[in-house]
Image (spheres, helix red, strand yellow):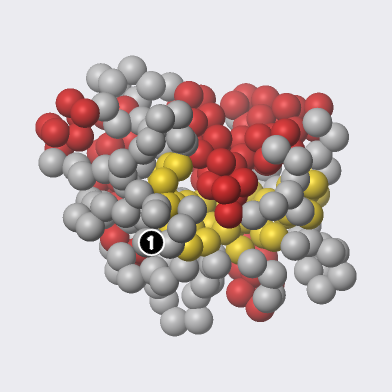
Amino acid sequence: MAGDVPHLTYVNAAQSQAIDDELMGERGFSIDCLMELAGLSVACAVQKQYTPCKLCIVCGPGNNGGDGLVAARHLCHFGFTVTIVYPKATTKELYLNLLNQCRDLAIPVLEQLPDLQTAGFELLMDAIFGFSFKGAPRAPFDSVLSALKATKIPIVSVDIPSGWAVDEGHPQDSLQPRMLVSLTCPKLCAKDYKGVHYVGGRFISPAFAQAHGLVLANYSGAEQCVRIDGGVA
């Protein structure tokens, strides 16, 4: 069975930010390191759940998009045929390096989402907005999310489904992914999520967890992700 934890800690937006701040402060992690581990865990969860297929990863301009870029590289190595859609690229060195790594693997990087009815994708990844996003999506992501909501292609969301409010749940007519990969701890908005649910991102030490009263997923051996919805991984 999956690594189900009945009393797993679900965190709100403020707690999520505090965890990240402490990880990148006194705990000694860099953003590069966290992003690499997060993206790897997302890729491992996808590889557990799906056989290699034609996959489109839609990346936002922030850290969630960076996690998607890392996942793209690993999933290419895992045998998936990956296309990246990056509508609003940033000029920050970290993201430029991640893009270069993907281009070195000949992963196509597009600015616009292709027509999902004709592109032939078998799986989509939503790596657009993370837990810090607030408000209504603006162009170009409003139309991208509309296309994702309209498609019947399975979608995997990274950390939270884009457009969901971390502390309040999902708005009406919101994105409904087939699979969610929460990072570090699942977020409050995912408490009633009914799809396939993994947790990844092995950042938290036992001392950190104890100090903050966090009940974490039970990782086995070298595993980078744990399925927590009660299904069979």
Q: Examine the image and state in which quarter residue 172 appears.
A: bottom left
Residue at mark 1: 229
Query: What percent of the width, then of the height, locates residue 97?
Result: 67, 25
Q: Examine the image and state in which quarter residue 67 appears.
A: top right
Q: Is residue 28 above or below residue 139?
A: above
Q: Is residue 46 above or below residue 178?
A: above
Q: Is residue 211 above or below residue 134?
A: above
Quarter containing the N terminus: bottom left
Query: What percent of the width, then of the height, locates residue 85?
Result: 73, 51
Name the side, left or right, on which 18 lies relative to 232.
Answer: left
> Dot 1 lies on which element?
loop
Name the side, left or right, on which 27 lies relative to 176.
Answer: left
Q: Examine the image and state in which quarter residue 160 appears.
A: bottom left
Report whether residue 228 is seen: yes
Q: Residue furthest bottom?
A: 172
**Which residue: 69% across, 60% down?**
123
Q: Residues within 10 Å of mark 1 (few under 14, many from 20)?
A: some
**Which residue: 46% across, 36% down?**
224
Query: What percent of the width, then of the height, locates residue 114?
Result: 81, 62
Query: What percent of the width, then of the height, locates residue 130?
Result: 46, 51
**Which residue: 42% across, 37% down?**
201
Q: Nearer the viewer, residue 166 or 190?
A: 190
Name the side, left or right, on which 21 lies relative to 233.
Answer: left
Name the side, left or right, on which 64 lies relative to 121.
Answer: left
Q: Residue furthest front?
A: 1
Q: Nearer the viewer, residue 17 or 90?
A: 17
Q: Is residue 193 above or below residue 68?
A: below
Report whether residue 12 is seen: no
Circle 1: residue type: Asp
**Which residue: 69% across, 70% down?**
153
